[in-house]
Amino acid sequence: RQKLDDLRSQAEIARRDTDLETASRLLYGEIPQVEKEIAAAEEAESAAGQTKQMVGEQVTA
């Protein structure tokens, strides 16, 4: 998440400095990629938590 915040800050600075090439690369390339990585990691973490919860319920039930 820190990397995502840093990229967004860099994109905003590039936009203010009219460095449109850098802003575009960040906004349409790097930021969406990092967002996908974060979403995948959160989904994997959620799935792992559900698996542990299901196993725990089966053992105690």
Image (tube, rainbow, N blue to C red):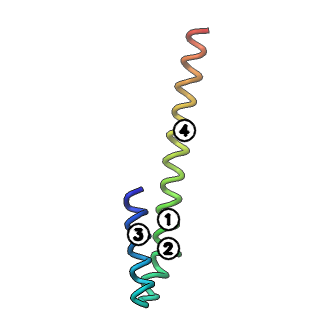
Picture disc at residue 33: 1
Neighbour tally class for label 3: few under 14, some 14-19, many 20 plus, Cα within 10 Å: some
Q: Quadrant of the N terminus?
A: bottom left
The answer for how far apart the CA atoms under marks 3 and 4 are is 25 Å
Q: Which residue is mark 2?
A: 29
Picture disc at residue 7: 3
Q: Are marks 1 and 4 in contact (CB under 8 Å)?
A: no
The answer for how far apart the CA atoms under marks 3 and 2 are is 11 Å
Vertical comparison of 49 with 2: above or below: above
Q: Using residue 39 as the reference point, say whether residue 8 is left or right of it.
A: left
The count of marks equals 4
Residue placed at 56% from the left, 20% from the top?
55
Residue 8 picture quarter: bottom left
Neighbour tally class for label 4: few under 14, some 14-19, many 20 plus, Cα within 10 Å: few
The answer for how far apart the CA atoms under marks 1 and 4 are is 20 Å
Q: Earlier in the sequence, mark 2 or mark 4?
A: 2
Give the image location of residue 29, x and y in percent: 50, 73
Neighbour tally class for label 1: few under 14, some 14-19, many 20 plus, Cα within 10 Å: some
Vertical comparison of 49 with 42: above or below: above
The answer for how far apart the CA atoms under marks 2 and 4 are is 26 Å
The residue type indicated by label 2 comes to Gly
The answer for how far apart the CA atoms under marks 1 and 2 are is 6 Å
Neighbour tally class for label 2: few under 14, some 14-19, many 20 plus, Cα within 10 Å: few
Give the image location of residue 52, x and y in percent: 52, 25
Q: Which residue is mark 4?
A: 46
Q: Quadrant of the C terminus?
A: top right
The residue type indicated by label 4 comes to Ser
Residue placed at 37% from the left, 58% from the top?
2
Q: Secondary structure at mark 1?
A: helix
The residue type indicated by label 1 comes to Gln
